[in-house]
Image (cartoon, rainbow, N blue to C red):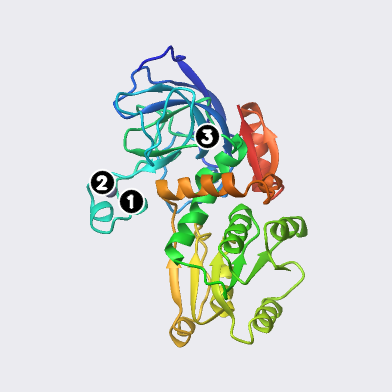
Amino acid sequence: MRGSLPKYSRAAVVREFKAPVCLEEVPVPQQVEPGALVTKVHACSICGTDIHLWQGNLSLRVDLPVILGHEMVGEIVAMGEGAGRDSIGQDLKVGDRITWTHTSCGRCYFCTVLREPTLCQYSRKYMYVCMEEFPHLLGGFSEYGYVVPEAGRVRVPDNVPDELASMASCAFRSVMNAFDLLGRVDPLDTVVVQGAGPLGLLATAVAKVSGARRVVTIGAPDARLDIASAFGADEVISVETTSPQERLDRVLSLTGGRGADTVMEFAGHPKAFAEGLDLARRGGNYVIVGQLGQGEVPIKPSAIVAKQLRILGSFSGQAKAYWKALEFVSLHGSHIPFERMISNRYSLDEVDTALTRMKNFEEIKPVIMF
Ligand SMILES: [Zn+2]
Ligand SMILES: [Zn+2]
């Protein structure tokens, strides 16, 4: 289907790392390929990864210039042939809101043999692909977005507001992917969550709803730890007022001296990894999600052997994780105050201010609203 699409979309473009982003007019594809969609973006929340990309600190390859932003939700305004169903099998029509995934090729070792599409070696990733090439609109801070044919897409439940749907398209789906990799949470488990940013807060909620006996969230500042408590943390520990040894002592005293059954890392600081190895009990699980920077830290590898730890890295998430995140918000939004994570709303014209405040740790989850 071809509607009357505008010629250009205003978008926030990174042409040079660390420089202010430029608001530019980017062409809107006038041909929608079979299986593709064009969306009018409603909201795109800011993620720590946007800041890392903007500052040139990512370990992943970036093909400048790119449209920044990757946590978006939009309304379908044009549909290619055969795009009438989402990745879950739900009908799609013009006017429906969706979130959409990075792509996987379906024809590589990682897609086919490992069945891990997030590890696809030919993936096209939103905000990593040069905006000068068709279909141009592969970033979230843009009035319009293009969902390429091989991208997963998930319809947003009606009771999930735009701000929460957008954060479900990266932050929350990464958390859901981590829980998938972990497997089940036992009702007798103590889960320690490292980090009280958006991912740590969301993981706190999921661990509690999954039935963990006790969820301990470690992070800062106190305002975020208050949200962690509202999301279900039984105990919060501030990294601003405690030493690593004090935190370890506290976790040991809560667990009969054993340590946490599962530790989940969303803090992002390399030092958190070394600390997490100590916090996990013998035979425990350690899921690492937040480490996307280039930092290094000394660790004692023998701790992994001596404790027989199960260590899992979790990267990104596929369509099922997007769906689970949206369903979780839809189901639990009445008793978990997700909206407390949304620290501010900005227009596209204010994107530089929003990014700078995010970089300076003055935001939790700010959202660009269109
Ligand atoms: Zn993100
Ligand atoms: Zn692949």
Classed neighbour count for the residue bearing mark 1: other residues with Cα under 10 Å, few (<14), some (14–19), many (≥20):
many
Cα–Cα gap, marks 1 and 3: 21 Å
| Contact (Cβ within 8 Å) of mark 2 with mark 1 | yes
Disc 3 marks which amino acid? Val
Residue 354 drawn at (x, y percent): 66, 38
Q: Which residue is mark 1?
A: 117
The residue closer to the viewer here, 160 or 305, is 160
| Numbered circle sitting on residue 106 | 2
Q: Is residue 53 visible?
A: no
- Vertical position of residue 84 compared to residue 200: above or below: above
Whichever of callouts 1 and 3 sits on the residue coming sooner in the sequence is 3
* Dot label at residue 73: 3
Nearer the N terminus, badge 3 or badge 2?
Answer: 3
Which residue corresponds to the image point at 52% horizontal and 56% vertical from the top-left? 175
Q: Residue at x 59, y 69 (%)?
A: 212
Q: Position of residue 35 (x, y in %)?
A: 31, 29
Q: Is mark 2 within 8 Å of ligand 2?
A: yes
Q: Dot 3: few (<14), some (14–19), or many (≥20) neighbours within 10 Å? A: many
| Mark 1 C-beta to ligand 2 under 8 Å | yes
